[in-house]
Image: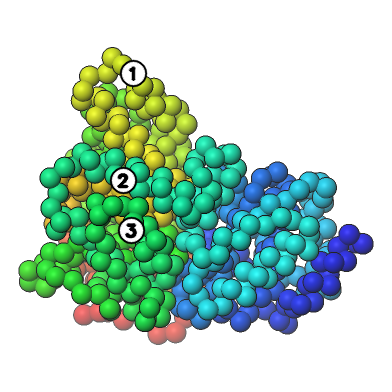
């Protein structure tokens, strides 16, 4: 215990409020900022232990992503820039919820369980978003790291994906890139400029993109990056943080949920626009047509655009690599049908949550994953990257192969493979549209989304619902899946599924059909079945019509 005396004394400066219990989930910890000081200190401790265990640099990002400005949160980043290992999520929860007097015991439990050599050096990279609370909270992380003798590098204001990138660069000894913000801009912009050389006749209108920065860190970093893009992309930045509140009536989540443009953004008919979320790890595109109708290009449309572009390049390069698109049950049925039936691309469905998608994408030569909310990226296996590089250097390749493989190589350099990255994804989309000579309307017309509707049903215990087949079928309670199946048969091009929420006692219902009225009606009927068979509480779900 003696070696932890400094930790114990320091922890008194970051006391835990009595009775507060939080759980580390996919998004790390999130809560009102005023409740998080002790959490940040303890995550500094945990990151130091994780660094000693892995003999690598670990990242700690202070952000609450698309949550309101009053909230904050923290995410841990593992050595290759991926999310922290699931077993350490449990350690994070235990350590965060330990009462003051049992903090050191909890620390020792983790050290013992993970057989950590405390003489190992530790290195932690720290980043924060633009929330007013992020400065003092990131200082609490620094206190945690320092009290266990760890070394830290504080990057200050960075996007979440930038910190993931830095951690990966550091732990690959620079093979992935230079672990600086400027290194990030240089790598991405160089790849983007190389790609857009393949679309030489672009007009200024085609280079113009209206960007909603959600009044967050993404806007700040987009400003810094503009000079590196040398006018090949002419960004009109709205919601840049100079006036509005972070995520308030703007940002990717707002646009996706409300199905309308953000406040504070002026857009002409047919103009290409996109929105980042608060920490710039999600992106959605949209435009309004000449009739003023709003058209959203969500994660499904983004994944489809990128995967079909990559598949065409693989064919032109003569490379026999398997490309797959990883989706969840929430992916629109039209996107799945288009990919499988028209483009003959493998589609794999997995449970909801980025970590499930990322893991599934790692099973293929090239794995493309995007959640409908606009969070996603592309993973290239080591073997795939090796084959592509060999072909780049092959003097006997014909011109078509040379062009295709050079495009593939630059696309790999433009993609942030560690995590979904709004800036990187935006540049990939812009490059693909330019190379293929497509407008945002052409992209939108690839397929038409089936109308869909989501409901939430309050239940006394969400655990009564158990699912299988990547959450597409209910195993319990008895009779629920049979009821859903018979309801679905009443509608055309229909499907529906239910799944328990990960955070509250509600069951989420999703339905789609050939008309909006049909989707609404099916969602209502399935909600009633859930209410009656799975212990609904409160009033029965009401029909929308």
| Of labels 3 and 2, the one closer to you | 3
Residue at 45 percent across and 34 percent down: it is 381
Number of marks in the rendered image: 3
Position of residue 78 in the picture relative to residue 243 (left or right): right
Residue at 24 percent across and 51 percent down: it is 232
Give yes or no for contact between labels 3 and 2 (Cβ–Cβ under 8 Å).
no
As displayed, is residue 90 above or below residue 242? above
- In this view, the residue in front, 334 or 37, is 37
User: Where does the image place residue 212, in percent across and percent down from the top left?
Assistant: 31, 69
First in sequence: mark 3 vs mark 1: 3
Residue 394 is tagged as 1
Which element is circle 1 on?
loop
Residue 454 visible in this rendered orientation of the protein? no
First in sequence: mark 2 vs mark 1: 2
- In this view, the residue in front, 201 or 430, is 201
Residue 322 visible in this rendered orientation of the protein? yes
Position of residue 222 in the picture relative to residue 310 (left or right): right
Which element is circle 2 on?
helix
In the rendered view of the protein, which quadrant contains the C terminus? bottom left
Q: Which residue is mark 3?
A: 226
Q: Residue furthest left?
A: 290
User: Where does the image place residue 170, in percent across and percent down from the top left?
Assistant: 58, 45
Q: Residue furthest right?
A: 2
- Mark 3: give few (<14), some (14-19) or many (20+) Cα within 10 Å: some
- In this view, the residue in front, 394 or 480, is 394
First in sequence: mark 3 vs mark 2: 2
């Amino acid at each position: 215990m003696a070696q932890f005396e400094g930790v114990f004394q320091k922890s008194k400066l970051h006391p835990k409020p009595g009775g507060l219990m939080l759980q580390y989930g996919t998004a790390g910890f999130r809560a009102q900022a005023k409740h998080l000081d002790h959490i940040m200190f303890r995550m500094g401790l945990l990151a130091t232990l994780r660094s000693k265990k892995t003999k690598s640099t670990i990242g700690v990002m202070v952000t609450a992503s698309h949550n309101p400005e009053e909230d904050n949160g923290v995410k841990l980043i593992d050595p290759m820039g991926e999310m922290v290992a699931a077993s350490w999520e449990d350690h994070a929860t235990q350590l965060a919820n330990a009462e003051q007097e049992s903090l050191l015991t909890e620390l020792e439990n983790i050290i013992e369980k993970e057989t950590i050599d405390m003489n190992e050096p530790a290195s932690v990279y720290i980043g924060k978003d633009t929330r007013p609370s992020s400065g003092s909270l990131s200082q609490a992380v620094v206190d945690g790291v320092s009290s266990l003798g760890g070394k830290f590098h504080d990057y200050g204001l960075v996007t979440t994906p930038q910190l993931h990138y830095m951690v990966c660069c550091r732990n690959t000894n620079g093979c992935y890139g230079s672990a600086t913000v400027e290194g990030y801009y240089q790598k991405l912009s160089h790849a983007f400029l190389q790609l857009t050389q393949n679309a030489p006749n672009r007009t200024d209108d085609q280079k113009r993109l209206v960007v909603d920065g959600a009044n967050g860190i993404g806007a700040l970093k987009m400003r810094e990056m503009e000079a590196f893009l040398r006018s090949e992309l002419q960004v009109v930045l709205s919601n840049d943080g100079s006036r509005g509140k972070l995520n308030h009536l703007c940002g990717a989540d707002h646009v996706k949920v409300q199905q309308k443009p953000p406040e504070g953004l002026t857009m002409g008919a047919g103009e290409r626009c996109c929105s980042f979320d608060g920490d710039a790890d999600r992106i959605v595109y949209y435009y309004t047509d000449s009739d003023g109708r709003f058209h959203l290009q969500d994660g499904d449309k983004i994944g489809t655009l990128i995967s079909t572009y990559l598949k065409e390049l693989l064919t032109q390069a003569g490379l026999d690599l398997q490309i797959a698109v990883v989706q969840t049950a929430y992916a629109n049925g039209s996107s799945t049908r288009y990919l499988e039936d028209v483009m003959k691309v493998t589609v794999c469905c997995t449970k909801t949550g980025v970590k499930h998608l990322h893991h599934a994408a790692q099973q293929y030569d090239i794995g493309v994953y995007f959640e409908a909310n606009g969070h996603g990226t592309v993973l290239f296996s080591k073997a795939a990257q090796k084959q592509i590089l060999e072909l780049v250097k092959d003097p006997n390749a014909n011109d078509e192969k040379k062009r295709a493989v050079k495009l593939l190589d630059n696309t790999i350099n433009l993609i942030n493979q560690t995590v979904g990255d709004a800036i990187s994804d935006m540049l990939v989309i812009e490059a693909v549209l330019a190379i293929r000579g497509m407008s945002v309307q052409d992209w939108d017309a690839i397929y038409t989304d089936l109308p869909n509707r989501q409901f939430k049903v309050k239940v006394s215990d969400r655990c009564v619902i158990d699912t299988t087949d990547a959450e597409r079928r209910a195993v319990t309670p008895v009779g629920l899946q049979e009821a859903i199946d018979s309801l679905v048969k009443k509608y055309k091009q229909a499907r529906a599924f239910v799944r328990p929420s990960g955070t509250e006692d509600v069951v989420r219902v999703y339905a789609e059909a050939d008309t909006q009225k049909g989707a609404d009606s099916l969602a209502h009927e399935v909600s009633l079945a859930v209410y009656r068979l799975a212990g609904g509480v409160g009033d029965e779900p009401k029909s929308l019509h």
